[in-house]
Image (cartoon, rainbow, N blue to C red):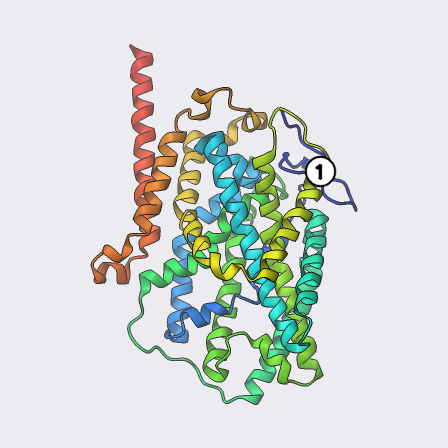
Amino acid sequence: MNEPAEVETHHFETLGIAPVPDAARTMTPGSLFIIWGLASASATTPVIGLVLHGIGVWSFVWVNLLALLVGLVPSMLLAHMGRQVPIISMVMARRTYGLGGATLLAVLYTIVGAGWFGLNTDVGGQILNALFPGHAVLWYSLLGVVQIALVFFGMEVLEKFYKYTALVFLLCYAILSYYLFTRYRLVVPEGKGPVAWGKDIDLILSFSLLAWAYIFPTVTRFCPPTAPAERKRVSALYMLAPSVGVMTAVLLMGILGLIALKMTGEWNVAMLGKSLPVWGEISAIGVILAIAHTNAMNLYPAVTTFLAVINVADRKPHRLLQPSTVIVLGVFSTLLAIAGILGFIQGFLGILGSLLFPFTFILVVDWFHGRYYRDAISSFYQPARGLAQLLAWPAPWAIAMLILGVVLGESGHLLPPAVDHFLPWQVCAALIVTLLYYAGLRIAQRRRRGQAAA
């Protein structure tokens, strides 16, 4: 059984997937907002302006606000779950999807995190190589080492890193924006046709809020535990901070990407640094901070997720398991960027991403229906003894609905154009299978009560 581990101060983190001790649960709503705002504010975030290049600025604002409203409730509940029980989301998932199902999903999401780490490192390497050409492998390697070092020292150092680099990040983007608007004629993008509201909301959510939400408990487990006497306003701040942080960054940087693409033909304003004075070049280099911000929140959850795969629940893991996993997974992800292999697996990452909506909704419903937050923490770490426990109810039903959700979510092209145009179909598909899942839980609950009464 895993007991709460000690978090070593001023040393590399050795916590692994163990519960966070109360002494280390000191993160504030302000820190949550900064962490998730900067994690979402990657140098690749303005690419949403390229993806939605036919949309006008005001329509883009409305799509983001609607996406926030659609994804807000499950995201807030996930953030709250980390405060209820200080464990990572993939350990929480063991109660819903079974130890076997949660382990398989943890493998998939580890690959997703490693892939996005490589993708962002690739963008950073391209920026540096544009400014100082001829040393691409060196820049990729240097970025990989710096980012691995950040995650190596764990959430305590990451929290401080985000806090102290936030102003530097804002200053760099402010300088680049200044050069953008003073050197080019201002053109505000206007819509070129009707907005595909449904598809665009799905895209925004899978790119941002619901792509991050399942990781929220992994960070909010470092927040103070919920208490009966806690004021509702304080509780709401902890629940809202991650979602608002993520979507604020997407909104502002997406608008910048849209405008920059229209004015210069280049969505990535950092790439303008190669033709700017020295302060422009320095700011373009500083934008790489945005890549480090995002990649830290790609690699850190990927490491904890992978630890959930290799962890033997009834045996205390070695104290060096987490730092060694950071190095191995970080090096692997950096090699992906150097090899350029990401161009071949982005489609695979997209398929894995389609798991996120139904996975998240089913996990949240099962958590609060089963009231798992009342259970002893040790119950989440019990190993399955035999196939019967490995596939115990409701794991088969949850996995079946998850697969159905992926199939439904990928079948949007079969819908009538009018429906597909206005409905965020991937979200709707996830809601359909979640309702089916909940109905199955209620039927099973009534059957058990009937058997007990008989």
Residue found at x 48% / y 81% = 265
Question: In the rendering, at what x and y percent does residue 139 appear?
Answer: 68, 67
Q: Quadrant of the C terminus?
A: top left
Q: Quadrant of residue 423?
A: bottom left
Left or right placement of residue 185 versus residue 284 in this view: left
137 shown above or below 303:
below
Q: Amino acid at mark 1?
A: Ala
75 shown above or below 165:
above
SS under mark 1: helix
Question: In the rendering, at what x and y percent does residue 403 appear?
Answer: 35, 41
Residue receiving disc 1: 23
Q: Quadrant of the N terminus?
A: top right
Q: How many marks?
A: 1
**Furthest residue toward top:** 454
Question: In the rendering, at what x and y percent does residue 305 appear?
Answer: 57, 42
Residue found at x 61% / y 45% = 303
Q: Is residue 30 visible?
A: no
Q: Is residue 285 visible?
A: yes
Q: Quadrant of residue 180?
A: bottom right
**Furthest residue toward right:** 10
Left or right placement of residue 153 versus residue 188 in this view: right
